[in-house]
Image (cartoon, rainbow, N blue to C red):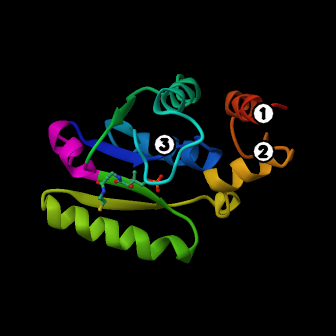
Amino acid sequence: MNKIAIYPGSFDPVTYGHLDIIQRAVSLFDYLLVAVVENPTKKPLFCAKERVEMLRDVTSDLKGVEISCFNGLLVDYAKERGVSVIIRGLRAVSDFEHEFQMALMNKRLYPEIDTIFMMARETHLYLSSSIVKEIASLSGRVEDLVPEVVAKRLYQRFNR
Ligand code: PNS
């Protein structure tokens, strides 16, 4: 039986941290569904279509990866797609409480689902989409933090 996992997130925008998790998860599962939440609770800088396009660009060389978009509850989408494993990246301890709450709530809503946490690589421990956006908006360099296509979009968005 094929093992399918879902890697959900805002991906606003995708960073090298996300990409590292995707590359490592794809070798653990037969198929990886990267799911962009269409309406994240925080107001996104990029619309869902742009976030999906960037993800497709940076994963085009990976086999067994699908980039998709969803609205509503993650567990409903997971159920609809026949997925029973959620992948989440963990960075610092500060991520833990929120991730723990989401994992337990998702399990309560859909007992067949399990969340698997993957530790971020050491070099990505302090990398987040929010910090990347802040740096780009303040005229900083983001080429070491996000793939080139993403850096270009960030610079365009901030008129640089
Ligand atoms: O990249 P993020 O913003 O940390 O991802 C958070 C995400 C998208 C995984 C989470 O907000 C989510 O699952 N949203 C969908 C709505 C939902 O299912 N909420 C209940 C979570 S217990």
SS of the residue under disc 2: helix
The image shows residue 127, relative to residue 14, as above or below, that is below
Amino acid type at mark 3: Ile
Mark 3 burial class by Cα count in 10 Å: few <14, some 14-19, many 20+: many
Q: Which residues are magenta?
A: 73-85
Residue identifier under label 2: 136
Instruction: Mark 1 or mark 3: name the one nearer the start of the chain.
Output: 3
Are circles 1 and 2 on residues that touch, CB within 8 Å?
A: yes
Residue identifier under label 3: 22
Who's the residue at 78% across and 44% down the image?
Answer: 136
Who's the residue at 58% across and 29% down the image?
Answer: 58
Q: Quadrant of the N terminus?
A: top left
The image shows residue 111, relative to residue 69, as above or below, that is below
Instruction: Mark 3 or mark 2: name the one nearer the start of the chain.
Output: 3
Instruction: Mark 1 or mark 2: name the one nearer the start of the chain.
Output: 2
SS of the residue under disc 3: helix
Measured in 3D between alpha carbons, the distance from the residue under mark 1 to the one under mark 3, in whole angstroms, is 24 Å
Q: Nearer the viewer, mark 3 or mark 2?
A: 2
x and y percent of residue 126 in the render?
67, 63
Measured in 3D between alpha carbons, the distance from the residue under mark 1 to the one under mark 2, in whole angstroms, is 7 Å
Q: Which mark is residue 155?
A: 1
x and y percent of residue 139 in the render?
87, 44
Q: Nearer the viewer, mark 1 or mark 3?
A: 1
Left or right placement of residue 114 versus residue 93 in this view? left
SS of the residue under disc 1: helix
